[in-house]
């Protein structure tokens, strides 16, 4: 069954308590920083696009209070000062030069500047019940999902919930594949990242930023399943959708002569298998838990919201000086495509 809000409403009895937040976050900044994987490095190895609270910085001490350190957030729910980020998509033209691919919002969020759509759910995308009791993240919690070194389907098989959809129109959702689409996509490429939903209950982070979290013991991201004994705490399903506006690069005369696809991640992955994302929890007080315990569907009256001009007005200055807008001869940081 396809993702369809109308179907979801129809399947739920009025008494069911269910929570599904779905909201836009405008672009906070595009910069070569990564306070999770490369704290203190300015520049970090590769370029990212970041949304959320304005306390985003080169180094982010987990003991610091993100809501307090932020003066604004780019997210619609104005108590959400979390930071969400991914790598940046580039087009590599036949002549060897690169251009950053712009982003747009999902349909319905027109006017929001770039960024991504964020979801918090009680259950996976295809479980229309949304009934699992979930425990919101603790202050200082952070996580990463994906494998920067994956270049084959086998290497990426652990992460089959990190996907691409070739958008025929802005509403296309299937099929979802784990590599870059091989043909031009008329309405862009949607990247979907679903984080694991089970936590060890103890560690806010871990050396690889993943050991403290886990997938359910059985099932998939669509069907869920119980959490393993090692990671017994069921957390919300955090899910990003990023729409890359590739249409302006769809002229096949500019694509590689061998017919292969021309898009590459900012760290040099030309396959798409190394899709990954980063999350730093930063909701104010108990706002996220409150929302997860309330009957919220997309909107949520228990949460404060802000309008689109306020989301767009929140931004931080880039710290690393380099050309991220023009045609460039190499990817920022000099990554080779492989
Ligand atoms: C980022 O960190 C630097 C150095 O600690 C600090 O001076 C600056 O105020 C921070 N910026 C933000 C937006 O918090
Ligand atoms: C390379 O190709 C792109 C796409 O056709 C074009 O816009 C750009 O100007 C070219 N750059 C050079 C140096 O030829
Ligand atoms: C959420 O709220 C917005 C703004 O009030 C409204 O346009 C939209 O239809 C609502 N969505 C749902 C699914 O209730």
Image (spheres, helix red, strand yellow):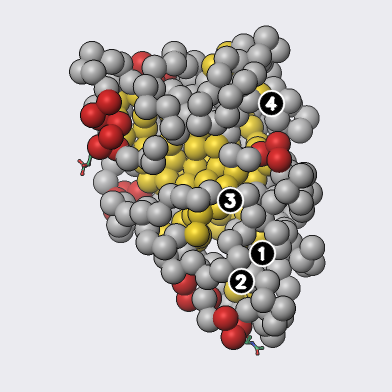
Q: Is the CB of the residue bearing disc 1 within 8 angstroms of ligand 2?
A: no
Q: Which residue is mark 1?
A: 264
Q: Earlier in the sequence, mark 4 or mark 1?
A: 4
- At label 2, counting other C-alpha atoms closer than 10 Å, the crowd grade (few under 14, some 14-19, many 20 or more) is many
Q: Earlier in the sequence, mark 2 or mark 1?
A: 2
Task: Tell me the quarter of the picture where residue 327 sits.
Answer: bottom right
Instruction: Tell me the CA gap for discs 4 and 2.
Output: 33 Å
Instruction: Tell me the CA gap for discs 2 and 1.
Output: 6 Å
Q: Which mark is residue 177?
A: 3
**For the residues bearing labels 2 and 1, Cβ distance under 8 angstroms:** yes
Residue situated in front as seen by the camera: 280 or 68: 280
Q: Earlier in the sequence, mark 4 or mark 2?
A: 2
Instruction: Tell me the CA gap for discs 1 and 3.
Output: 16 Å
**For the residues bearing labels 4 and 2, Cβ distance under 8 angstroms:** no
Q: What residue is shown at x 76% (from left), y 44% (from top)?
A: 154
Q: Quadrant of ligand 2?
A: bottom right
Task: Tell me the quarter of the picture where residue 257 sits.
Answer: bottom right
Q: Which mark is residue 91?
A: 2
Q: Secondary structure at mark 4?
A: loop
Residue 201 vertical placement versus 79 (above, below): above
Residue situated in front as seen by the camera: 298 or 333: 298
Residue 165: x, y in percent?
51, 54
């Amino acid at each position: 069954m396809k993702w369809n809000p109308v179907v979801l409403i129809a399947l739920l009895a009025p008494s069911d308590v269910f929570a599904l937040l779905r909201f836009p976050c405008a672009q906070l900044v595009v910069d070569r920083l990564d306070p999770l994987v490369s704290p203190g490095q300015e520049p970090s190895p590769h370029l990212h696009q970041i949304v959320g609270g304005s306390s985003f910085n080169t180094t982010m001490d987990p003991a610091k209070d993100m809501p307090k350190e932020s003066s604004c957030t780019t997210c619609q729910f104005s108590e959400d000062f979390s930071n969400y980020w991914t790598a940046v998509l580039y087009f590599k033209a036949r002549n060897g030069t690169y251009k950053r691919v712009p982003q747009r919002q999902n349909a319905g969020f027109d006017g929001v500047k770039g960024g991504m759509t964020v979801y918090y759910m009680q259950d996976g995308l295809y479980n229309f019940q949304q009934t699992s009791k979930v425990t919101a993240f603790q202050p200082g919690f952070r996580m990463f999902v994906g494998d920067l070194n994956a270049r084959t389907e086998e290497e990426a098989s652990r992460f089959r919930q990190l996907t691409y959809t070739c958008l025929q129109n802005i509403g296309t959702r299937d099929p979802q594949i784990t590599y870059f689409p091989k043909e031009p996509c008329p309405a862009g490429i949607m990247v979907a990242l679903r984080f694991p939903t089970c936590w060890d209950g103890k560690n806010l982070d871990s050396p690889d930023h993943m050991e403290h979290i886990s997938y359910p013991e059985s099932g998939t991201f669509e069907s869920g399943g119980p959490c393993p004994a090692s990671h017994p705490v069921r957390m919300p399903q955090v899910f990003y959708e990023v729409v890359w506006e590739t249409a302006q690069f769809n002229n096949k005369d500019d694509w590689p002569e061998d017919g292969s696809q021309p898009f590459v991640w900012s760290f040099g992955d030309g396959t798409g298998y190394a899709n990954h994302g980063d999350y730093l929890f930063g909701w104010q007080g108990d706002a996220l838990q409150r929302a997860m315990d309330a009957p919220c569907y997309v909107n949520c009256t228990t949460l404060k919201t802000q309008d689109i001009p306020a989301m767009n007005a929140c931004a931080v200055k880039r710290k690393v000086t380099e050309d991220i807008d023009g045609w460039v001869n190499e990817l920022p940081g000099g990554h080779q495509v492989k």
